[in-house]
RNA sequence: GCGCGGUUAGCUCAGCGGUAGAGCGCUUGCUUCACACGCAAGAAGUCGCAGGUUCAAACCCUGCACCGCGCACCA
């Protein structure tokens, strides 16, 4: 056992242990070891963006997973924590494209072309892709790195393709021209989930249109988007609206584009129940190409669809010469200008409305009609049932409601993206004209349902490989939504569809840890994929973390610059400190307001742990000697009972995913109970010169420390491993059960009835120890009240109500830092004015020779009397109520009676002391 | 509009039917032979508001207010 250094230096220690764990393959899962005695435990990591960097959100999320994984190992389970990264289509493509533009390599990705651009993305991925994985290692994540996966790995891509083909064959995937959410910046369709509604302060423009059949008569329309007027192909009113219903069937003159002949600008006035008479003017302009609701109205009335925008959100020629080429927001101003010139603009009023934004690019999405691929979600019923029946459990429970609501309102999923980076859609379109020949050319072996005539009449082939005659078939240029690959993550990472040992041993996984913000994007979809392809739920429990916010409660974001770099925090405080600080302040189901002070607390705690171990080491003696029950002091028994309680509480908290409760309990136990009271009290035994007592105390300390290190290990893997070895606790353990690494040691079990019986641990030991600590506290208050500096040794006198063991008196003396603690009989009377404290075990005196201030003491006692009297008033008020005495349970009434007599006795005593002052 | 959280000490949060708790911050004393990233003592709260249930409410119920989030939306 080499001596521990004086200060804890996390950096070197963290690096060393992580390397040793890796060198010994401590994190590798072995499916062949799984058995009824050694059950499997598995988690798949929520794959971070391959080009991302570690955020505090990742720290929270992955620390929780690491705690679960490490504890599961200590519980004797075969653990697989499967790591990996996500290709994150739009995000990654955007980053690479932006960088290439910045470097002046390209102006647009078209300059490179698809193949060359993708090469650049792969280059980028090779260069930056490993960063976040390395950062997770710094955090101490015990992932099985031998099984690390990437969603664009060849095997993974094969899974994605196989699933697409299967769903195509089942008819769950279809292509159609639909209104989708279009991001003009990324120039791709988005799913509904990728659109966030934002409140906007805009303007409601009122403009008038003339009724063609009744010159000089006008209708007033309210709109927020005057730039789309050129795309209007109808005017709708509510068919019940008395103001307008007689106009139905007539025509209005659309004001824009101005240069267009009037005859071409006539659009029909129609009745549609969708129009609310009470809103605006009750007249709605219908723009089928640029509004989802309008598209439906247009569809009902066979209105033409007139697209007036380009994919990048600028106006096209159909918008008219004044608007063509302008960005949509610029065009809005010009359109208003045009209306004003035409004297058609009646008024502009400020207006609050909600606009859908592209979550990624943070610009308003444009509803746009385009050809896209859609998926009707599979296995919906099983997926809903598994959560509502409780077979799969959400923590906190309330998220299951959110899940249920979404599952009950499923809309088909737009899965195609107009990007290059991602899994290319495995569909080929026939270029020729002879459909029969095309079918024949595919060969006999191709299943009938792989070939389909689409809505637009084109012939499509769907398969995991291109048709042989590549000249006649052209692959769809789009890729799949990133989530269409990540929804397969729990099994595609384990080698599915092959039924290999890993998949068999570890699927379904045990726990999933993720943020509630991706409950629809990811969690729900994984559940459906799990049932569809593995016939089983993908995970049994889902733990939803809170969201990390800054001190002001704002979400962490790059643009606000309010997100500290976790690596800086690790460098400054250590990984254990970061883990502990974050865990202690992350209660279940609540968002976390991050404050560096929390990490500081973690660091301080590590230092405390370190020094407690140092203190033990400085005492020398045998490591983990035998505890002999006959030499146990009440303090020893007390700390063993507290340890037992801590084991039980921490285990229960972790079983229920109450991580911050577990951290709190550990903190309280180790700092307040072990260090503040036990270690201090044990100094009496260690310095007593009684070797039996001394050895026994050291044995108890080792017992408590060894158990504590195990309890702390999932939270603080590095420092505990270091101390485990530093204190030599590994020495007499089998190699695989803690002899080599603490991380392989067994999780502590509650001490149990036999242990209690053998060492004579009784509840009254705890009560007695607490009473002695009260004596000490009372003495310290006396010191304080009479301005005795805490380092100044003064004599105290103790007058116990009943005999007390000399050793226990010595403990009190040490804890009081008293010069002497004279133990006197009940006949002893203190000099007049001696400060006195009443304690559960007797009276404690602080004789202040020559310094007695009778008035000061009288005043001090007076305050105490007031306090006791207040308590008595409260308790007597209750007891004097008949309804209380007859209505409350007997035990409660009894407890109140005891409270009353206790206070009364104390009052009598303290009055006697007060009287003695002046006698 | 519907739903879900939250409102407890200056700050961040536990507690969720029977004597209001922690950490930080603050005040005071202490370089006491593990630790000043420490030790000791302390100040500090009509538990958002109003009703109700109960012998008893911070805790259960009902309304309201404010903060946050989600879903759905009327141009």
Image: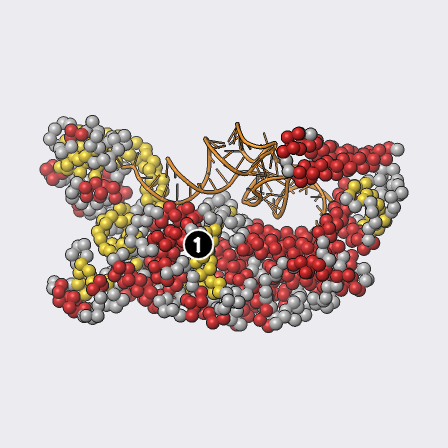
State the image quarter where residue A643 is shown. bottom right
Indicate the quadrant containing the N terminus of chain A: top left, top right, bottom left or bottom right. bottom right
* In this picture, residue A158 sits left or right of residue A831: left
Observer able to see residue A761? yes
* In this picture, residue A838 sits left or right of residue A32: right
Q: Position of residue A535 (x, y in %)?
A: 37, 61
A29 to A370, vertically: above or below: below
* In this picture, residue A621 sits left or right of residue A583: right
State the image quarter where residue A501 is shown. bottom left
Q: Residue at x 85, y 49 (%)?
A: A823
Please state which of residues A682 and A341 is positioned toward the viewer in this rendering: A682
Observer able to see residue A10? no
Q: Position of residue A695 (x, y in %)?
A: 76, 64
Q: Residue at x 77, y 61 (%)?
A: A630
Q: Which residue is drawn at 56% across and 53% down?
A: A653
Secondary structure of residue under mark 1 = loop
Q: Residue at x 74, y 55 (%)?
A: A635
- The residue indicated by pointer 1 is A391
Chain of the residue that carries numbered disc 1 in the rendered image: A
Indicate the quadrant containing the C terminus of chain A: top left, top right, bottom left or bottom right. top right
Q: Where is residue A458 in the image (x, y as percent from the top left)?
A: 17, 58
């Amino acid at each position: 056992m080499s001596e521990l250094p004086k200060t804890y230096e996390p950096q070197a220690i963290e690096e060393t242990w992580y390397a040793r764990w890796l060198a010994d393959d401590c994190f590798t899962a072995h499916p062949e070891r799984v058995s009824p005695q050694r059950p499997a435990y598995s988690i798949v990591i929520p794959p971070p963006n391959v080009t991302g960097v570690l955020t505090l959100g990742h720290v929270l999320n992955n620390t929780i997973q690491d705690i679960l994984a490490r504890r599961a190992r200590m519980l004797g389970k075969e653990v697989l924590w499967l790591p990996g990264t996500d290709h994150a289509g739009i995000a990654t493509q955007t980053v690479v494209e932006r960088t290439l533009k910045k470097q002046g390599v390209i102006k647009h990705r078209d300059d490179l072309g698809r193949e060359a651009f993708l090469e650049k993305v792969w280059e980028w991925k090779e260069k930056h892709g490993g960063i976040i994985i390395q950062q997770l290692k710094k955090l101490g994540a015990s992932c099985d790195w031998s099984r690390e996966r990437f969603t664009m790995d060849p095997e993974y891509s094969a899974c994605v393709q196989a699933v697409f083909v299967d769903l195509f064959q089942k008819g769950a995937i279809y292509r159609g021209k639909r209104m989708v959410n279009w991001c003009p910046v990324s120039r791709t369709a988005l799913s509904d989930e990728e659109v966030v509604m934002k409140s906007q302060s805009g303007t409601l423009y009122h403009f008038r249109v003339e009724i063609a059949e009744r010159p000089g008569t006008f209708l007033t329309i309210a709109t927020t988007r005057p730039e789309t007027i050129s795309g209007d192909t109808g005017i709708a009113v509510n068919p019940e609206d008395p103001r307008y219903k007689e106009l139905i069937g007539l025509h209005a003159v659309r004001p824009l584009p101005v240069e267009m002949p009037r005859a071409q600008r006539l659009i029909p006035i129609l009745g549609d129940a969708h129009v609310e008479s009470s809103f605006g003017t009750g007249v709605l302009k219908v723009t089928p190409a640029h509004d989802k609701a309008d598209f439906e109205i247009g569809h009902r009335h066979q209105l033409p669809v007139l697209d007036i925008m380009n994919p990048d959100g600028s106006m096209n020629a159909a918008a008219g010469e004044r608007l063509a080429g302008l960005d949509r927001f610029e065009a809005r101003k010009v359109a208003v200008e045009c209306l004003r010139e035409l004297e058609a603009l009646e008024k502009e009023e400020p207006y609050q409305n909600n606009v859908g934004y592209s979550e990624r690019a943070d610009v308003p999405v444009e509803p746009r009609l385009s050809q896209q691929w859609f998926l009707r979600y599979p296995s919906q019923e099983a997926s809903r049932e598994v959560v509502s029946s409780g077979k799969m459990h959400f923590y906190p429970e309330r998220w299951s409601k959110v899940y249920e609501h979404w599952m009950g309102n499923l809309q088909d999923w737009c899965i195609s993206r107009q990007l290059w980076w991602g899994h290319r859609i495995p569909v080929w379109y026939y270029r020729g004209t002879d459909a029969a020949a095309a079918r024949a050319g595919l060969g006999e072996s191709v299943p009938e349902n792989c070939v389909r005539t689409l809505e637009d009449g084109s012939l499509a082939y769907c398969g995991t490989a291109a048709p042989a005659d590549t000249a006649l078939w052209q692959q769809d240029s789009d890729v799949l939504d990133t989530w269409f690959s990540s929804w397969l993550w729990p099994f595609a990472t384990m080698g599915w569809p092959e039924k290999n040992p890993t998949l068999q041993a570890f699927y379904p996984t045990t726990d999933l840890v993720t943020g509630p913000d991706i409950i629809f994007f990811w969690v729900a979809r994984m559940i459906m994929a799990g049932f569809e392809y593995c016939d089983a739920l993908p995970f049994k429990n889902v733990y939803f973390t809170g969201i990390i916010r800054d001190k002001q409660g704002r979400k962490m974001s790059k643009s606000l610059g309010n997100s500290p770099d976790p690596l800086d925090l690790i460098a400054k405080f250590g990984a254990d400190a970061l883990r502990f600080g974050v865990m202690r302040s992350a209660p279940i189901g609540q968002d976390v307001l991050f404050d560096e002070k929390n990490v500081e607390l973690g660091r301080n705690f590590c230092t405390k742990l370190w020094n407690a171990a140092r203190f033990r080491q400085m005492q020398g003696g045998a490591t983990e000697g035998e505890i002999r029950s006959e030499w146990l002091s009440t303090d020893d028994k007390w700390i063993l009972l507290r340890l037992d309680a801590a084991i039980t509480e921490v285990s229960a908290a972790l079983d229920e995913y109450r991580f911050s409760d577990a951290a709190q309990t550990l903190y309280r136990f180790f700092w307040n109970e072990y260090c503040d009271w036990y270690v201090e009290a044990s100094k009496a035994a260690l310095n007593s010169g009684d070797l039996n007592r001394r050895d026994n105390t050291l044995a108890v300390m080792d017992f408590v420390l060894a158990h504590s290190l195990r309890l702390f290990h999932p939270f603080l893997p590095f420092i505990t491993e270091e101390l485990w070895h530093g204190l030599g606790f590994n020495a007499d353990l089998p190699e695989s059960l803690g002899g080599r690494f603490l991380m392989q040691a067994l999780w502590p079990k509650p001490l149990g009835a036999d242990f209690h019986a053998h060492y004579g641990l009784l509840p009254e030991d705890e009560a007695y120890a607490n009473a002695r600590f009260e004596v000490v506290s009372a003495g310290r208050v006396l010191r304080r009240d009479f301005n005795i500096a805490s380092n100044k040794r003064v004599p105290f006198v103790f007058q116990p109500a009943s005999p007390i063991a000399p050793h226990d008196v010595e403990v009190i003396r040490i804890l009081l830092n008293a010069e002497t603690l004279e133990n006197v009989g009940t006949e002893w009377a203190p000099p007049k004015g001696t400060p006195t404290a009443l304690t559960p075990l007797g009276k404690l005196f602080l004789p202040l020779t020559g310094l007695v201030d009778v008035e000061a003491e009288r005043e001090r006692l007076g305050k105490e009397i007031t306090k006791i009297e207040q308590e008595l008033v409260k308790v007597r008020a209750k007891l004097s109520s008949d309804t209380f005495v007859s209505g409350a349970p007997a035990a409660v009434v009894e407890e109140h009676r005891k409270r009353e007599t206790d206070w009364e006795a104390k009052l009598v005593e303290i009055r006697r002391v007060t009287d003695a002052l002046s006698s």
